[in-house]
Amino acid sequence: MDIGTLVEQAREGRPRAVARLISLVERADPQLREVMAVLAPLTGNAYVVGLTGSPGVGKSTSTSALVRAYRQAGKRVGVLAVDPSSPFSGGALLGDRVRMQDHATDPGVYIRSMATRGHLGGLAWAAPQAIRVMDAAGCDVVLVETVGVGQSEVEVAAQADTTVVLLAPGMGDGIQAAKAGILEIGDVYVVNKADRDGADATARELNHMLGLGEAREAGAWRPPIVKTVAAKGEGVDELIAALEKHRGWMDEHGHLAVRRRRRAAQEIQTLAITTLRHRVAQNQLDALAERVACGELDPYTAADHLVAAVTA
Ligand SMILES: Nc1nc2c(ncn2[C@@H]2O[C@H](COP(=O)(O)OP(=O)(O)OP(=O)(O)O)[C@@H](O)[C@H]2O)c(=O)[nH]1
Ligand SMILES: [Mg+2]
């Protein structure tokens, strides 16, 4: 099928067409260049929300609850579950972890899981392009769930328009969150499993760690902490309200444009570096390495040789 027809069908909301386009991303298909050129003018409408947090904290349950709420509001929703720790072809495996069965038959919801380990350029490369596909396909909201709280997961979540960091009582989450640096990236914090003991204490601890009691610059964003019981849909309206508020604030202060430019810059850089890496001839690198290893050449000069060779 030609790319134009495929994109047209995706925009009509045909899940199979969207699936085929995202498969091109996963495979890093040579046709991707053409696809992205067709998609470019169709993107920029979706509101991208990243959700991150420790395993089992309730990301998928929360995502599912958000999907329900957005669907009730008549929005088309895309869900991208990204697992950087699994091999690239492990999509089916990840599918088990995505608790989205409720929405499986709803044509207004598009759900996709993506495993990216071992992929050249990895996550930074694949996730933004999959988001582009969903955006161009007419999703009003794209929810990006990342599994785990490693550096790459945090990077993906931080690329969203709004980043949600989830914690739950009694998981030692606070410390883990601080370690992974997710206390710097949250625009909205959720203490899920508020039906369990210790939710208030977790919220207090978080409040303290984020320095929310302290004064901030006028007009600065103060990340709200929302308590939810995602499994029962409790607090989800408050979460949606917090997301909308953040989006409004971003718009008002011009931050949305800034963030999207930053996202695009990262995407361009990753693609450019990937292209250059493809051009490095292994034998040439080996030859330079040998000369550097035996002290015949310094590494800077060797690097200059390599750069000159791949950009010639
Ligand atoms: N008690 C309680 N359990 C919940 C709540 N939300 C989710 N759970 C349960 O917590 C478990 C993990 O939920 P998931 O939504 O799969 O968590 P996750 O963060 O997506 O997990 P991974 O994708 O494996 O990292 C499931 O058994 C849920 O039913 C809640 O608000 N209260
Ligand atoms: Mg999950």
Image (cartoon, rainbow, N blue to C red):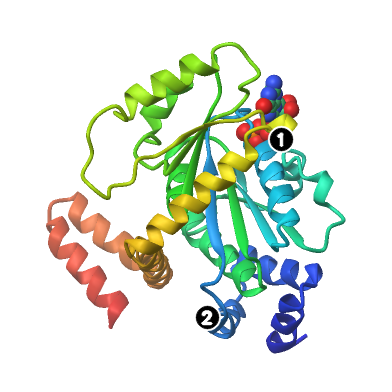
> Percent from the top left, x then y, of residue 18?
72, 70
Split into quadrants, the picture shows ligand 1 in the one at top right
Secondary structure beneath label 1: loop
Nearest the camera: 110 or 223?
223
Mark 1 Cβ inside 8 Å of ligand 1 = no
Residue 170 relative to residue 150: left or right: right
Q: Is residue 161 visible?
A: no
Is residue 191 at least partly visible in the picture? yes
Q: Using the rendered view, name the quadrant where residue 21 is placed.
A: bottom right
At x 69% / y 36%, what residue is drawn? 61
Image height check: is 143 above or below 273?
above
The residue nearer to you, when weighing 226 against 268, is: 226
Q: Bin the neighbour count of mark 1 within 10 Å (Cα to Cα): few under 14, some 14-19, many 20 and up.
A: some
Residue under the image location 55 percent in, 66 percent down: 129
Q: In percent of the image, x 29 and y 28: which residue is there?
A: 211
State the quadrant of the N terminus.
Answer: bottom right
The Cα–Cα distance between marks 2 and 1, rounded to whole angstroms, is 36 Å
| Pointers 2 and 1 in contact (C-beta within 8 Å) | no
Between circles 2 and 1, the one closer to the viewer is 1
Q: Earlier in the sequence, mark 2 or mark 1?
A: 2
Tell me the quarter of the image containing the C terminus: bottom left
- Residue 224 position within the rendered picture, expressed as x and y whole percent measured from the top left: 43, 37
- Residue marked by disc 2: 40
